[in-house]
Image: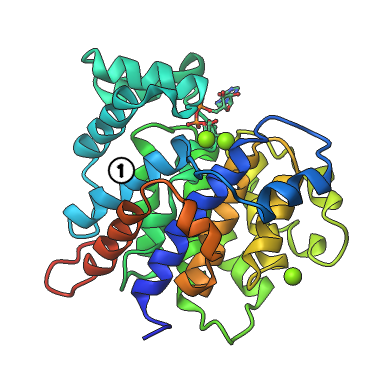
Amino acid sequence: APNSWQTRARGSLLLAACADALGSVFEGQRGLDPERVAEAVDHVASSLCWTDDTAQTLVLAEHLAAHGGRIESDALAAGFADAWSAEPWRGYGHGAVQMLAQINDGTPWREAAQSAFGGSGSLGNGAAMRAAPVGLVPGCSLDEVAVAATASAGVSHVHPEGIDGAVAQALAVAIAARTPKDQGLQVNEVIEAIAARTGAVFAAELRAVPALLAGPAAAISDRYRCDATALGAVPPAIAVFLRHPDDPVALVKEAIGLGGDTDTIAAMAAAICGAHCGEAAVPQPWSAALEQAARVRAAADGLTRSGDAAQRRC
Ligand code: R7I
Ligand code: MG
Ligand code: MG
Ligand code: MG
């Protein structure tokens, strides 16, 4: 059925991977010319090559599928370290590289994650950028999604803001996947469902989103840093989704146009949008150009099966 969980899981992972690739060209730039962004998004000529955001998302999706929708931290940390050493050129964050290299050298992941950034742990958006699959395990309550997202983050991001980013993004995807496409999203209910499950600092940033939904997109990049931190990137991604819940092309253009961490903000907004709209909403020129599209679809199908009552534990 066009509204089934499978199409939503596929829509989420496919659209996120496409947005990651489209946004990667602009990562770190500010004050982007909207026409340059539109040109890149509207005229996809060559292959859409994704970055660490999608590499880690696929590791997490395949992990959840192999473990009945459950996080096994040792295996997940090893999976991230293996993916990095196989393809270190995907654009990983500075702290992530140090941590993954330590794991490959035999340091326990717990120690590597805790020692990041002088012992405070990473507050980067890396746990959020890969969190969508947690929201795509069928049959979980939102509380179960939050618990699983916390576990998925903890192998690399121990700072509370790094963890809250993953919780917020996984919950946004889970809520979008549960909301019928023809039924409007209740903005305040969505924000409160997420804010209630994050800490006070993160919740305050999320609660600023509803005021940014009607005005110009520039109000989003004025309000949030739109950088590689969880606090700076996840609320703007959720804002862009709520502004364009049914329009992936407008959503990706706007997310990239914010500037800063363009691949990650676009990928997170797109993961939420795809979970709401399903695979049919993915522009055909994007999916046709997407690197390893068959693997992305298979990962979504594995997530869909991970909700089978007989094996699910989340
Ligand atoms: O979180 P992480 O995997 O980064 C994801 C980002 C995305 O944009 C990807 O597309 C890729 O480009 O990287 O990797 P980290 O290095 O742990 O965190 C990302 C960035 O957040 C770091 O490079 C720092 O700039 C910043 N950051 C911090 N800055 C100060 N103090 C993270 N933690 C801290 C901190 O504790
Ligand atoms: Mg990236
Ligand atoms: Mg619109
Ligand atoms: Mg990025």
Q: Which residue is mark 1?
A: 59
Q: Quadrant of residue 108?
A: top left
Q: Quadrant of residue 144?
A: bottom left
Give the image quadrant in which the ligand numbered 1 is located: top right
Q: Is residue 104 left or right of residue 133?
A: left
Residue 12 against residue 45 in the figure, above or below = below
Residue 77 position, x and y percent, is 27, 33
Asked where in the image residue 248 lies, by quadrant, the reply is: bottom right
Front in this rendered view, residue 35 or 205: 35
Question: For the C terminus, which image quadrant?
Answer: bottom left
- In the image, residue 195 sits, relative to residue 23, either above or below, namely below
Q: How many numbered dots are placed on residues in this image?
A: 1
Q: Between 52 and 208, which is closer to the camera in this rendering?
A: 52
- Residue 308, x across and y down, in percent: 19, 73
Identify the coloring: rainbow
Q: In this image, 241 relative to 104: left or right?
A: right
Q: Residues within 10 Å of mark 1 (few under 14, many from 20)?
A: many
Residue furthest left in the image: 310
Q: Residue 222 in the image: x percent, y percent? A: 84, 43
Which x, y percent locates residue 233? 64, 43
Q: Quarter of the image containing the N terminus?
A: bottom left
Q: Is residue 28 above or below residue 279?
A: above
Question: At 39% from the left edge and 39% from the top edge, which residue is drawn?
Answer: 55
Give me the residue at 34% from left, 60% from top.
297
Whether residue 170 is visible to the viewer of this picture, yes or no, is no
Residue depicted at x 48% and y 51%: 289
Looking at the rendered structure, the secondary structure element under dot 1 is helix
Q: Nearer the viewer, residue 41 or 109?
A: 41
Q: Can you tell me whether the CB of the residue at mark 1 lies under 8 Å from the nearest atom of ligand 1? A: no
Check the image and report above or below for 88 versus 293: above
Instruction: Give the amino acid type for the residue marked by disc 1 in the picture.
Output: Val
Name the residue: 68% across, 56% down. 42
